[in-house]
Image (spheres, rainbow, N blue to C red):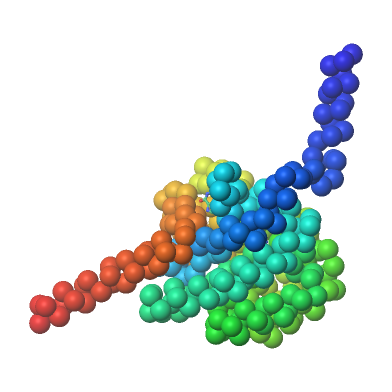
Amino acid sequence: RAKETGKARALVYSPALAGPPQHDISLEAAMFQAVREGEFLLYYQPIVDAHTREIQGFETLMRWKHPTLGMVPPARFIPIAETNGLINLLGAWALKAACVQLKQFEEVAKRSLYISVNISPRQFRNDKFLDVLDDAIAFSGLLGEQLVLEITEGTLMIDPVHAESILSKMAERKARIAIDDFGTGYSSLAYLKRFPISVLKIDRTFIRDLPGSAKDGAICNAVLDLAKHLDLSVVAEGVETEEQLQYLEERGCQYIQGYLTGKPMAANVALAALKESIHAKLVPAELRQVAQ
Ligand code: C2E
Ligand code: MG
Ligand code: MG
Ligand code: MG
């Protein structure tokens, strides 16, 4: 009897049914302290060309380096920041800092790159969002087209009329919109027609079991086909093996992001990776000069 009650309770209180999860109050208090202490930082994960593996851009991923807890993953702190509104402050900082950082990446790489930044639902709906965007572009001196803003299907669906107006204003600034975790949200494909979207990021859960899973293969193929006909770029997320990369590349996936081609890294590590890639390219030219 007691066991039965226990089971019923477990069902009633399962996170999916109980609404928003209960947040850890002490973690929340620590977050405000962390903002004052400057404990948040940005990591950068390369997005590479599937064929050449050359870095085309980076996704900015926020990290919280707590003095005693260590690295707190965004899956733990972003939902809290989303609930208490701190995401507006953190998100504005991340956007501006990432744009400035991209300038330094470009100086070292000696070519044009792009930066992809996650925008949470609350940030997207915030009145000040377009000002924050304009400030980041103006302050850094980036071109709008070098900026990709990652939003989820859910963000678009909360208020499609408002979303349409914000997206058209982003498009005026030439910033591109990527749908993050594509295929995992509750939405209809009609929004691909309605909104000015440029990039689909295939969620990691569809990549993980490639090339063995026929179902995941079918989903990836369908997304690639859809993207081709709608003239959208595709980034495959969470690519961890050569087999996955090869499978995707053979099917026309142009961009790859995953541990195989680069984990999220601190800015100085990303700079070193960019430097190394120029050296790798310079070698043959220098050898040619020596030979002449
Ligand atoms: P996301 O935007 O879908 O980011 C991709 C996540 O996949 C990152 O997790 C990244 O580290 C992870 N990942 C990349 N390649 C691989 C791989 O090959 N294998 C595996 N297992 N994982 C891989 P991370 O950094 O923990 O971020 C989790 C989520 O937190 C992000 O998912 C995003 O939704 C959110 N987030 C991170 N930074 C920010 C931010 O600055 N602002 C907002 N609003 N959300 C952020
Ligand atoms: Mg993302
Ligand atoms: Mg994603
Ligand atoms: Mg994801």
Left or right, 244 with reference to 201: left
In percent of the image, x 87 and y 33: which residue is there? 12
Image quarter hosting the N terminus: top right
Image quarter hosting the C terminus: bottom left
In percent of the image, x 55 and y 85: which residue is there? 141
The quadrant in which residue 151 appears is: bottom right
In percent of the image, x 70 and y 57: which residue is there? 32
Residue 170, how many percent across, how many down? 70, 80
The quadrant in which residue 3 appears is: top right
Vertical position of residue 61 compared to residue 275: above or below: above
**Residue 248 or residue 119, whichever sits in front:** 119
Number of disc labels: 0
Residue 131, how many percent across, how many down? 72, 80
Q: Is residue 231 visible?
A: no
Residue extending farthest to the top is 1
Residue 231, how many percent across, how many down? 61, 74
**Residue 283 or residue 276, whichever sits in front:** 276
**Residue 220 or residue 41, whichever sits in front:** 41
Q: Is residue 165 visible?
A: yes
Residue 136, how many percent across, how many down? 62, 79
**Residue 23 or residue 289, whichever sits in front:** 23
Vertical position of residue 222 compared to residue 230: above or below: above
The quadrant in which residue 138 appears is: bottom right
Left or right, 35 with reference to 48: right
Left or right, 217 with reference to 280: right
Left or right, 202 with reference to 248: right
In percent of the image, x 75 and y 58: which residue is there? 82
